[in-house]
Image: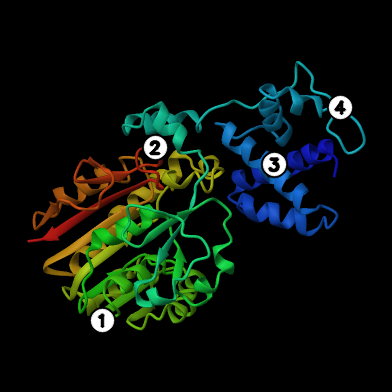
Amino acid sequence: MTPQARVQAAIEVLDAVIAAARTRGAPADRILADWFRTRRYAGSKDRRAVRELVYTAIRRCGEVPASGRAAMALVAQGDPVLAALFDGARHAPEPLRGDEPVARAGIAPAWLEAALAASGLDGEEQEALLGRAPLDIRINALKEAKAILPEPGEPVVASHGRRFPPMTPVEQWPAYAAGAIEVQDAGSQLVCEAVAARPGEAVVDLCAGAGGKTLALAAAMDNRGRILACDVDRPRLSRLAPRAERAGVTIAETRLLDPDREAAALADRVAAADAVLIDAPCSGTGTWRRNPEARWRLDERELARLVQLQGRLLDVAAPLVRPGGRLVYVVCSLLDCEGAGQVDAFLSRGPEWRAAPLLGLGAGRLRGPGLRLTPGHDGTDGFFVARLERV
């Protein structure tokens, strides 16, 4: 592909990404993969170049662009070499016109930028949300002897974490095949450490998804005790069993829940858990480094729905915890309505609960009754975590 053709390809992919964002369709990485699957003539250099153009444009645009061309025109404003590729040649975009629409630069849609600022994130912190994320792994303590890495990586603040450059092919390493390592952001590892799961305990992972945190908890428990991993998403939850087998985890069982009927399905676990982890569905504002187009998919109505769901999940989880046990609430969001404000509301309606200090994690800053990790301050994905104790 010529450089001009790569720009035109990026515009076409961006059109598909924008349409998917408006309809909550496929994510950008899947759209890119599908686009290249039907264009075998594109070599590896072409794929890298088009991908870089697409993600540069996504990160640069605050509001949802009118079109892929408008998004790429914004990028071209600060890049004369790129602007020159709009020359109208074969397979090239038409020349840029002075009167054509150009996307708005920014961190996010205006309402969302205001919400981030109201949640205490200044300009630098907001800009860091759109940087490129490194690749972190967690060494599986259950198979540490097999964690022989071709590259040492850099240590991170998480106890068993290592950091590598983006796109490092760790899933091709023998240590990965052996279950000795898992891909997991350092922040995600830290919030698992906040649970302080110990051998022999009974733990519930209420929103387990595909089980990344379940596996980390099992390793912390030295494969002794019980973990009940629950979710309402059957396809995601079904991925846990093969992952657990590869990791050597034997103490995790799964339970598929029906939305809005979780409490009934967990009646046999009332007051039986030493710890319950709620990794609640959220806006994902802390993960934009990995999914920058996600900020185009969020609106105030969806945020309100998520806040209501989070509050309900806290109320579902609370009865499962035995007296003296702990409830750990986590969101990969940096908005106070999903983090500190959500926990404050829970504490106001639950006098038998108190917030416990999260000491010894080695990262994060206090935010209300919990701790907040941010890409700008901590170099991790963004998280809010609070540990609550039942008195």
Q: Which residue is mark 3?
A: 14
Occupied quadrant, residue 8: top right
Q: Which residue is mark 2?
A: 376
Crowd band around label 2 with a 10 angstrom C-alpha radius: few (<14), some (14–19), many (20+): some
Q: Give the foreground label among 2 and 4.
A: 2
Q: Give the foreground label among 3 and 4.
A: 4
Camera-side residue of 233 and 208: 208
Q: Give the foreground label among 3 and 1.
A: 1
Which mark is first along the chain, 1 or 3?
3
Residue 204 % position (x, y): 28, 71
Residue at 74 percent across and 38 percent down: it is 11
The numbered dot on residue 224 is: 1
Camera-side residue of 243 and 12: 243
**In this rendering, position of residue 342 left or right of residue 238:** left
Residues at discs 3 and 4 in contact (Cβ within 8 Å): no
The numbered dot on residue 87 is: 4
Distance CA(mark 3)–CA(mark 1): 48 Å
Crowd band around label 1 with a 10 angstrom C-alpha radius: few (<14), some (14–19), many (20+): some
Occupied quadrant, residue 162: bottom left
What amino acid type should be assigned to the residue bearing mark 3?
Answer: Leu
Distance CA(mark 3)–CA(mark 2): 27 Å
